[in-house]
Image (tube, helix red, strand yellow):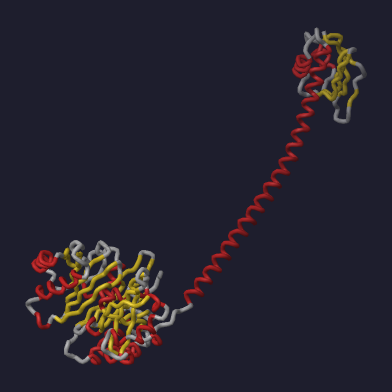
Amino acid sequence: MLFQTSLGIDIENSRVSMAYLKASFKGVGLAAYAIHLFEKEKPVEEKLGTVRGLVEDFLRENRISSTDIFLGIPRDLTVVRYIELPLAAKENLRETLGYEMGKYVPLSVDDIYFDYQLLGEDKENGLLRVLLIVAKKNAIDPYLDLRNQLGRRICGVENSSTAMANYFSCKPNRPDGDVYALVYVRDDNLELNLVKERFLNYSRSVSTGDNEGNLHSLLLQELKSLRETLGEDHGPLETTFCGPDADNKLLNILREEADLDVRPVDLSGTRIPSYDLIPAYGLALKAIQKVPMDINLLPVELRKKASKVGYYAMFALAGLLILSVVAWGGGSVLHQKLTLNRLNAEINRLSVEIAKIDRVQKKCKKLESRIDYLNTLRGGRAHMMDILKDLSERIPKSAWVRKLNFSDKGMQVEGHADSASELISLLEASPLFKDVAFLSPITKDRDGKERFRIGFQVK
């Protein structure tokens, strides 16, 4: 879940580890962590009092105001059982387990907290394979008191085995293959887990207090027992070793004598400084992404109710998205309409210009037709264009022609000039004209210009 945060707190006999995770576009990252040691001999209540203060300091120092907290308890406080039930029990599995709890642990259901996980269904034989984890109430109640002291922000409680399985199942650099073993050595406890297809399929906790100095013998014995659960046909079992004694000598002994592909835990590229933070990291993952192991020893009535804020936010965002799409679509339509209006206006303006051009072109064609016609009338005489050219060259710039007529009787030119008499000599000098003469008396207008009307023949 994007931008979600979570705090995993793993409490062991002599230490508490805290991992604060943040989810972002880049993925899940370790934002803050802490590891604190305390004396193993202290009573649980005193240890948890110390843990409370350490957690409050951690939240304050890292400015964490609100986040989900998941609590990890020592593996040896829980009993792990793998059981088979009829397929019909799936509908009411919790109630069925409560009724038959005496078959699996020597404790009354009233004296325990328990949770379960469905590992698989064998429909052919009509069976369910179920992981059952049980803890005494008097062992868990101090942790529930810690939950109350921290403002009821603790959303889940589980042991370190399921937390480790979640860590290795969800990390990009998890061990290869569908089946691998996890060995975890810390304090005076040895923890062995088998993960198969991301689920915890074997878990055992053994005290190492009576085997100090002979850890490899105890490891060989326990790992051989774990190895036998897979059968002889299974090849070398890939095993990740987490602990302070992961030296080459010990690992080589395990490789040779237990048919194991043993390697120390690889934390490169994870930003996790110590293997002691692995359970805390696995605990915190539960609030950020879907994990395969979903165990919670908190009583059902104390578990955090699913918040509907996310759903409301999703619907609100969906509504905003729809409104944005509608607004974008409406804006696009309006923009297209305005553009269309501008185009239509431009088309109308150009249509007027085109009409004007068409009228000019029609006039030009009419003039061309008249000229062509006039040229055909005088097939053997001078070309009309030559006559017009000669006239335009001989009539001075101070005179201007108002009218030009052409007929079988000859040509007539009417206009105004500073000196109309000069025009007679100019036109007589043309090789194209003859019989040049005034057709009417010369008169003057208001501007002093002489008005003339001259006639002549084309040679």
Q: Which quadrant of the rendered structure holds the N terminus? A: bottom left
Q: Position of residue 343 (x, y in %)?
A: 67, 47
Question: Residue 173: x percent and y percent?
Answer: 27, 63
Check the picture and name the quadrant holding the C terminus: top right
**Nearer to the camera, 88 or 249:** 88
Rendered residue at 71%/41% (across/down): 350
Left-right relation of 61 to 264: right
Which residue ends up furthest to the front in the rendered image? 125
Would you identify the image quadrant in which residue 84 lies?
bottom left
Q: Residue at x 48, y 78 (%)?
A: 308
Q: As rendered, which of 357 and 126 lies closer to the eye? A: 126
Front-lying residue, 295 or 35: 295
Residue at left offset 92%, top offset 19% = 441
323 relative position to 353: left or right: left
**Quadrant of residue 219 in the image?**
bottom left
Query: Can the viewer see residue 106?
Result: yes
Q: Residue at x 33, y 72 (%)?
A: 119
Asked where in the image residue 202 lies, by quadrant, the reply is bottom left
